[in-house]
Image: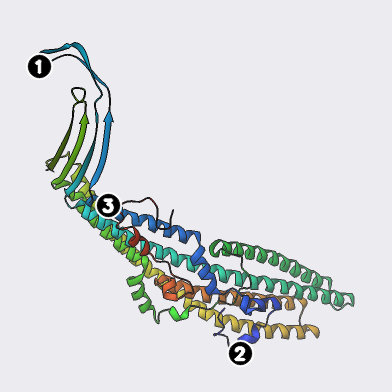
Amino acid sequence: MDVKERNPAARSALRLAGAVASVLVVACPAAAETLESALSRAYQANPALNAARANLRATDEDVNRFQAGYRPNAAISADIGVQQFQGSISGAQINGRRGLTVPGGAGLTVNQNLFDGFQTDNRVRAAESTVLGTREGLRQTEMNTLFNAAQSYMNVLSDTATLELQRNNVEVLEEQLRQTRDRFNVGEVTRTDVAQAEARLAGARSQVSAAEAALRASIGIFRQIIGVEPRQLAPGRPLDRYVPASLDQAILIGLKEHPQILASLHAVDVAELQVKVAEGALYPQAQVTGAVQQRYDQQFPGDNGVTASIVGRVNIPLYQGGGEYAAIRQAKENVGRARLVADQDRDTIRASIVRTWGNLEASKAQVIASQAQVQANEVALNGVREEARVGQRTTLDVLNAQQELLSARVALIRAQRDRVVNSYDVVQAVGRLTVRFTSLPVTPYSAREHLDQVRDLWFGVRTPDGR
């Protein structure tokens, strides 16, 4: 909760039940879970974030896979069989006997691509752009995970405070009902007053059940995102130090740094390179093949020989049915679509920044207004109770005043929660809710390290982590 915005009057209005204070003030700070430590847990262990990292590592391999087009292909072949013949060779009878040989041999063939219309070059560049776009997608997932973790943290805090408010309200209404019954027994009030107190108490108990259900749901989401059960949560603070100074500055930063926009721009690069790959099918293709073979018993038993060859081939396509032209046109249309998607993402991010900025400004005002509302309702409730004691107010007036104070306190809890969450939402909207930018106490994941490890590997089936 935002402690800095409380004035002395508001602090007096927030003197709630003891359990509410346990949400806002931690009894054992040394053992408490802070918002920063919860975000660090989510950053390290959240399954969705780790899955996005695994997806990036798989995408890294596309660079090495397309680089294989630069490298030679080599294969060893071997064969053996049985061959029988009978007759003559060049008119000479072979002693009237059948010839039986066991031909076989082994050979090595090496193919090296010399020129493929720059298709390999463009495929590698497209794979590298895809990797860069996937890195931005990972950063987007990281921001979503950290925001969801902050939101779930604050939901547990606010739902816990709300539950304790509702429980405290039940205790107050139970005492109110007891006093009303005592006054009824001495004839000061009617049966209607007792019924009104009983109805309010039943409604309050229903609200406790609803608050318990909401808290259980928030705890479940906390466990899903952060990975542990919430225990002794410390107060959460707004991320104001990373919020831009103005809306215009926030929009400028978001349009320049947001990962969704950067990923879209990388997608445009990939689409443009796919056009060049498709155009490469129209260019000549050149390769060289070297082969060496050892053969046995090819014609007669006991004969053998070694053959070696180097052959260069050039293939110049003339017409292939028109499919390659359709592929080029299709790739160009994909470029246009990718550019439109990038424009759409810019508009989406700009609208998101404006929306979250407005929510943050509104939540700041709501905190101040809710504090004043709580203070005024406390004064009003005390006054109504005093007037009821001298017969100037009815039991219903007291119950209504009590309900208004409860609603104001719940609204204050919600406003304080929104104040924190909306600050995180603004930082996320501008693209800066990351571990590196917010300096969370955790070692950042290196998206570049895996690509550096696998880029130039010529062979091997083990991943860098040993699998």
The crowd level at tag 3 (other Cα within 10 Å; few <14, some 14-19, many 20+) is some
Element carrying mark 1: loop
Element carrying mark 3: helix
> Which residue does the numbered mark 1 point to in the structure image?
90
Numbered tag placed on residue 8 in the rendering: 2
Distance from Cα at disc 1 to Cα at disc 2:
118 Å
Q: Are marks 3 and 1 in contact (CB under 8 Å)?
A: no
Q: Closer to the N terminus: mark 3 or mark 2?
A: 2
Kindly indicate the quadrant of the structure image that contains residue 103: top left
> In the picture provided, is 107 more to the left or to the right than 433?
left
Residue 39 on image: x %, y %: 51, 70
> In the picture provided, is 272 more to the left or to the right than 348?
left
> In the picture provided, is 308 more to the left or to the right than 160?
left
Mark yes or no: residue 133 visible: no
Kind of residue at badge 1 = Ser
Q: Nearer the viewer, residue 285 or 337?
A: 285
Kind of residue at badge 3 = Phe
The crowd level at tag 1 (other Cα within 10 Å; few <14, some 14-19, many 20+) is few
Kind of residue at badge 2 = Pro
Residue 85 on image: x %, y %: 21, 16
The single residue placed furthest to the bottom in the displayed view is 8
Q: Closer to the N terminus: mark 1 or mark 2?
A: 2
Query: On the rendered image, what quadrant is the N terminus found in?
Result: bottom right
* Residue at 35% in and 71% down: 257
The single residue placed furthest to the top in the displayed view is 96
> Which residue does the numbered mark 3 point to in the structure image?
66
Mark yes or no: residue 1 visible: yes
Distance from Cα at disc 3 to Cα at disc 2:
66 Å
Element carrying mark 2: helix
Eye-nearest disc, 3 or 2:
3
